[in-house]
Image (tube, rainbow, N blue to C red):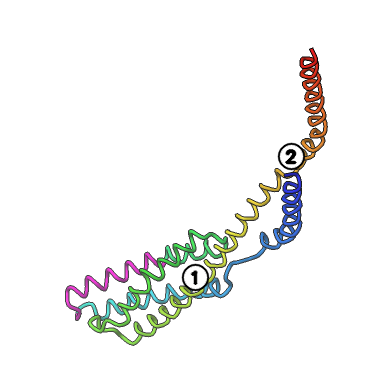
Amino acid sequence: MRDKNKTHYKLKRFLTKHWTKLTASWDNEIVSSLPLQMSLYFNLWFFPFWWASSIAMLQLKYSVLPDYYKFILVTSIILTSLIEVIRLYLGYMGNLQEKVPELAGFWLLSLLLQVPLILFLLLNEGLKIQPLERAVNIIFVVFLVFQVISAFLALKRMVNQLATRFHLHEFDRLDAHLPSDNLAWQTRRLEAPGIMGQKVEEFHSTTGVWGSAVRA
């Protein structure tokens, strides 16, 4: 039992020695995506141009659109504008500050809402798409596809780093109890001979009493 405790203690010490060397490098590792941040920066400057182009084309063709397409087009532009503001904010916060919830929200908004809306504006010929609209929407789709891919890779790195930090903190918490465990083990090892000697003396005294009783 003592050999098992001693081996367990040495194993934990060995792991602590090697894992703590990697803790500093993992904690200081930057997992923000530079390509994603660059695309967000250019997207931020591109969005006002896209919005102005969409409004200008809407005024140009509004009178010749059917009533239901008027409603759909206006609703689509409003939703796209609102989602884009929220999406860019979440992207900046999540990538620069390495926050997984914000970056995950950015990725979901891009993939599930913004990409379908822009594809609808780009591919639905019933909207009487103008050349300027087609050009800006193609650029928008390129931004979105690139950001979806790069945000997914950045999320993967961030989640892996968070999992590593969690395991390291758990290991540090376990290692904090090592001195007390080792002290208790050393105390039990030192007390063991005294306890065994006391039991041997009790056994001899009991044997002597039984021997006296038998002789009597």
- Mark identifier at residue 201: none
Kind of residue at badge 2: Ser
Q: Which residue position holds label 1?
A: 152
Front tag of 1 and 2: 2
Against 153, residue 185 (above or below) is: above
Q: Which range is magenta?
A: 64-84
Q: What is the number of callouts on the image? A: 2
Residue 58: % across, % down: 28, 77
**Left of 132 or right of it: where is 18?**
right
Local packing at callout 1 (Cα closer than 10 Å; few below 14, some 14-19, many 20+) is: some
Instruction: Answer whether residue 83 is magenta in the image.
Output: yes
Per the picture, the main secondary structure of the magenta-coloured stretch is helix
Residue 76: % across, % down: 30, 71
* Kind of element beneath mark 1: helix
**Left of 154 or right of it: where is 80?**
left
Of residue 201 and residue 41, the one placed in the foreground of this image is: 201
Q: Which residue position holds label 2?
A: 180
Local packing at callout 2 (Cα closer than 10 Å; few below 14, some 14-19, many 20+) is: few
**Left of 55 or right of it: where is 36?**
right
Q: How far separated are the C-alphas under marks 1 and 2?
A: 44 Å
Quarter occupied by the N terminus: top right
Residue found at the very far left of the displayed protein? 67
Tell me what residue is drawn at x 37 percent, y 71 percent.
114
Against 20, residue 114 (above or below) is: below
Of residue 54 and residue 122, the one placed in the foreground of this image is: 122
Closer to the chain start, of discs 1 and 2, is 1
Quadrant of res 185: top right
